[in-house]
Image (cartoon, grey):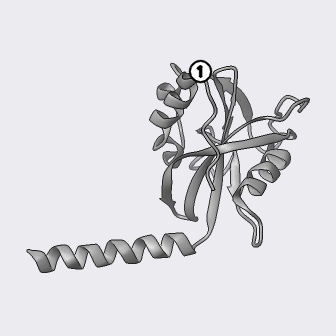
Amino acid sequence: MLRILAARSEVLVERAAALAAGPVVVATAAVRAGLLLIAQRTRPPALAGRWELPGGRVEPGESEPDAVVRECREELATQVRVTGRLGTDLPIDAGVLRVHTAELASGAPEPQALEHAAVRWAGPDELAEVDWVDADRAVVADLVALLRSGVPAPERA
């Protein structure tokens, strides 16, 4: 039994190392007045119509918070200020997904659906009913807790 547990432990350590070294995709949990900004996908066809947290790949040499700011500018035509991290690393086909919390920057324009079918602000009681992409559904409980706490998540290094 100990050999089996040791072998499984080795596999988990190898998988964690591979995820840590692989590509990173950031998602943005942008909060305003107890509401969460969500975006409706247009592609690929299998995900069209489903909702997600805005975000995208971290470019080489780019920090995760910088990627959050860039992706929100490109996808939503708005400016955000990153306030922390939410949840744990989530393995996805493209690498690892990391959710960052944010708020609209002072004087930022209202988010627009530049690369999505729609964007909207959703409250904590709505989130369980949203047709989320699978990766984002994994953090719904964390998102609800964030909205109900009324405070941004603390900045993590």
Q: Is residue 33 left or right of residue 1?
A: right
The correct choice, above or below, for 99 with respect to 33 in the image is: below
Disc 1 element:
loop
Residue corresponding to mark 1: 123
Residue 136 picture location, percent across and down: 53, 44
Point out the residue furthest to the left here. Answer: 1
The correct choice, above or below, for 134 with respect to 126 in the image is: below
Quadrant in which residue 121 is drawn: top right
Residue shown at the point (56%, 49%) measured from the top left: 46
Quadrant in which residue 154 is drawn: top right
Residue 58 picture location, percent across and down: 71, 63
Q: In this view, does 40 lie to the left or right of 114?
A: left
Q: State the quadrant of the N terminus.
A: bottom left
Name the residue nearer the viewer: 79 or 134.
Answer: 79
Give, as a three-letter code, the residue at label 1.
Gly
Q: In this view, does 39 lie to the left or right of 110?
A: left
| Mark 1 surroundings within 10 Å by alpha-carbon count, few (fewer than 14), some (14 through 19), many (20 or more) | some
Number of dots carrying numbers: 1
Quadrant in which residue 153 is drawn: top right
Residue 55 picture location, percent across and down: 70, 50
Residue 147 picture location, percent across and down: 57, 26
Residue shown at the point (51%, 19%) measured from the top left: 125
